[in-house]
Image: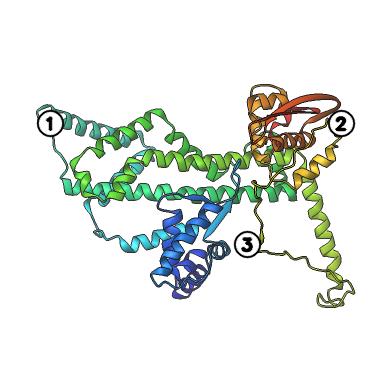
Amino acid sequence: MTAALHAATYERLRREAAWKLLSADLAPDVLALLQHLLYDTQRALPASVLHERLTTELAELRAQGRDLQGSAAQYVGQWLREGWLERRFPEGALEEEFELSAAAQQALRVVAGLQTSRAVATESRLSLVMDELAKLSRDTDTDPTSRLQVLQEERRRLDAQIAAVAAGDVPVLEDARAAERLREIVALAQELTEDFRRVRDDFARLYREFRERILQGEGHRGAVLEDLFAGVDVIAESGPGRTFAAFWKLLNDPEQSALLEASVDALAARPFVQAVGRDERRFLRGLTRTLLERAGSVNNTQTGFARSLRSFVQSREYQEQRRLTQLLQGATALALPVREHLRPENPTGFELRLSMATFRSLGRWKLHDPVQPIQAGALESGDEAEVSIEDIAGQVALSEIDLRGLGVQIRTVLEHQSQCSVGAVLQRFPASQGLGSIVGYVFLGTKHGQVSAEHRERVSWLTSGGESRFAYIPLIYFFREQRDDIL
């Protein structure tokens, strides 16, 4: 590759998020905050927790003379725009969560590599390379004769080692060499755990590509739609999906998992382990848990994408999206011929008043004084209120009811029975939001269930004060066939 090609490549990389983070004016402060908040301990934080902790850290840095003028919300917004943070809304969560992007993690690894000093060439690194090359050569050899010679040579070597150990000759690796080899293994394992984020990004990219193919639905792109109708998990059958499936299978193999845990426990008790750093020892002790947690997160993401694609197709939503795309393309085609005669800046004679939000200080609020006298009044029985399904849907749209959590509860009940009513769900999962949960179930029933307006069902809940309340609602049934469509 010539110098010109190198320069063009580096110019492109310079515009990417990782390089921009390393070259930012406040790079030391930003890297330190990202590492402390979202890398060293927890890898994801709810929005409220991140803002609170970032505010505290900013105050401490300002007290040390660091030039950080913005607020926590401003910095989080900037980091999102720069591609150093990503946010997502996990299923069942009450608020969005933030985590480092793959580019930010890559920048932190670059900085960590600049701080780490180690020998350029070590016996342990050379041994790892030689062992893997020999194993690869043996596993890809198709000649039975040479394979047999290698196996016989390995058997002679093992027989010699068995005889030596039986005679009391037990060669042990020197502590310095053992510690160096352990450092190399830990470094390799750390790189492995960081790769999970990139794998999850690959699944997200595949998910977007498959949705685009479904919407276009022409030629070979229509094959994706046919596979989904046939029940094929197109993400799992992709290249990244098969690679991760092999890794996930090996990680969950009982024999291999037991061997890994036994090896980690045995190494942790060896004296030479004290020669490596404390962070490396901590990582080694939690290696199995870390692998399972991060690989499990990727597996859940893959499963969620596959379920979403299947629901997207089975609900026929893709047809509506495809029709909308065709209308937009048609409107664009009609607008192209007149672009030379009607410029975007030409007045149209139509005025649109922009909306705006009004902000008021919390200091203007007046708190309620419960000590003020309350006039007692007589309670009178009232008639039953008639509330339509449309009114309930309107109230749900203006509320903060946890519809995701309610959907999870309905799907859980449908795992064990073919159909269920709102009352059956409440028997398994009491209304955690009181009347709000009841309203949420009715709303979900109007979208994904069958409503019998002629029949009523009595449901009950507890208020925030622990008092029991009940009401009669239309009889609503949820069916297992629509289970995947529920929020």
Label 2 sits on a secondary structure element that is: loop
Q: Decide which of tag 3 and tag 1 comes sooner along the chain.
A: 1
Q: In which quarter of the image is residue 344?
A: bottom right
> Could you tell me the amino acid type at mark 1?
Ala
Task: Calculate the distance from the C-alpha at mark 2 to the C-alpha at mark 3.
Answer: 41 Å
Between marks 2 and 1 in the image, the one whose residue lies nearer the viewer: 2
**Image x and y of residue 111, in percent:** 38, 63
Q: Would you place residue 268 above or below residue 58 in this image?
A: above
Image label count: 3
The residue depicted at 36 percent of the width and 37 percent of the height is: 143
The residue depicted at 72 percent of the width and 25 percent of the height is: 423
Q: Which of 149 and 424 is in front in this view?
A: 424
Task: Calculate the distance from the C-alpha at mark 3 to the C-alpha at mark 1.
Answer: 82 Å
Q: Would you place residue 293 above or below residue 156 in this image?
A: below
| Lateral position of residue 217 relative to residue 254, left or right | right
Q: Decide which of tag 2 and tag 3 comes sooner along the chain.
A: 3
Label 1 sits on a secondary structure element that is: helix
> Could you tell me the amino acid type at mark 3?
Gly
Q: Which residue was labeled with disc 3?
A: 363
**Image x and y of residue 50, in percent:** 51, 55
Tell me if label 2 and label 3 are in contact, CB under 8 Å.
no
Q: Which residue was labeled with disc 1?
A: 164
| Lateral position of residue 262 relative to residue 39, left or right | left
Any mark on residue 311, and which? Answer: none
Mark 3, residues whose alpha carbon is within 10 Å: few (<14), some, or many (≥20)? few
Q: In which quarter of the image is residue 333?
A: bottom right
Q: Which residue was labeled with disc 2?
A: 383
The residue depicted at 52 percent of the width and 43 percent of the height is: 298
Task: Calculate the distance from the C-alpha at mark 2 to the C-alpha at mark 1.
Answer: 94 Å
Q: Decide which of tag 2 and tag 1 comes sooner along the chain.
A: 1
Q: Which of 114 and 121 is in front in this view?
A: 114
